[in-house]
Image (spheres, grey):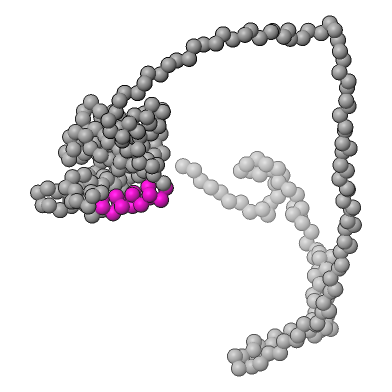
Amino acid sequence: MLFQFTRSHTDHHEYCEACGQRLPAPGGYGDKQPNRIGIAISVALHVLVALYFLFGPNRKIVLTPPAKEGDMVWVAPLPKTKPSKPKTQPQPEQKPTPRKTQPAKITPRIVPQRHNPNAITQVEIPEQPRTPQPAKLTPPPPQVDDMQAMVEAARRRRGAVPSAESAPESDDDRARRIARANIMGAQGRSANGERNETGGIFDVTNKTFNSADVKFRGWNTNFKRQWLQQVHVEVSGEADIETAVVKKMIELIRKEKPGDFEWESHRLGKVVRMSARKDDEAELAAFLMKEMFPEYRRAR
């Protein structure tokens, strides 16, 4: 069994009996006299603080209450400042424009022609006398009993235009003819004023890069009246939308006119006779492309 014994320090021993360390001598933990220097410093600080509060200046900070809503506050105006005079900038000196001097005209120097006997000149070839050719005898005109036939025969010999042909059409006459044809076409009549029960007018609307609407206003023989037919065209397998529109127009034309037909061209200003046959499809397609799309250029 382990027991712990406590011993007092009345009996001084040089070494500790428990741990074996050397013990300090008695009275070595500090002097029992008071610290006089520390007490003096503490007293001096307390005296200085008391003197400051007793003899220090009395500075009271007075805070004015904020102005109420009904009170008026006077604001001192700012001092007036005199407007500063604008500084005049010195104008730049205008440089005199240099006068354009005309170049002196150089008179060409006249060089006298030199007659060099050794110079190469063109040899004058003497003209050969021309042999007179026998004149061709024109056969006498055939005997014509009719006077008018004789006059026409004389005109044909001279190469003159026969009188049956009319004079060239003027611009005013051409404009009137086109306007009259447009009015008759809108009324569904021919140039003679008769009811035209065939043909029609084409119009392309809502055209984009891949689709368009083709309107065909023609005469319907079943109802005896004008009939509007609208077809939506898409590119599908064609090269572009213009080619698809032209092929659809040829298809509509063949339903009305499978053979020859007349096309009133506003671009050319006249009526052109075209063919809707299968053999002439390439020529008709090229013509309609210029009529409907004048600015068309095939993409390469």
x and y percentages locating residue 175 in the rendered image? 38, 50
Above/below status of 188 relative to 163: below
Quadrant holding the C terminus: top left
> What residue sits 12% from the left and 48% below the top?
221
Taking the image as shown, residue 290 lies to the left or right of residue 46, namely: left
Report the front residue among 240 and 21.
Answer: 240
x and y percentages locating residue 155 in the rendered image? 38, 31
> What residue sits 66% from the left and 53% below the top?
9
Q: Is residue 298 visible?
A: no
Q: Is residue 173 magenta?
A: yes
x and y percentages locating residue 231 in the rendered image? 22, 44
Taking the image as shown, residue 76 lies to the left or right of residue 100, namely: left
Question: Residue 208 lies in what quarter of the image?
Answer: top left
Task: Magenta stretch: give its range.
Answer: 171-185
x and y percentages locating residue 194 in the rendered image? 19, 51
Above/below status of 193 relative to 290: below
Q: Is residue 153 magenta?
A: no
Above/below status of 269 relative to 7: above
Report the front residue among 62 and 169.
Answer: 169
Question: Residue 247 lies in what quarter of the image?
Answer: top left
Above/below status of 92 relative to 41: above
* Principal secondary structure, stretch drawn in magenta: helix
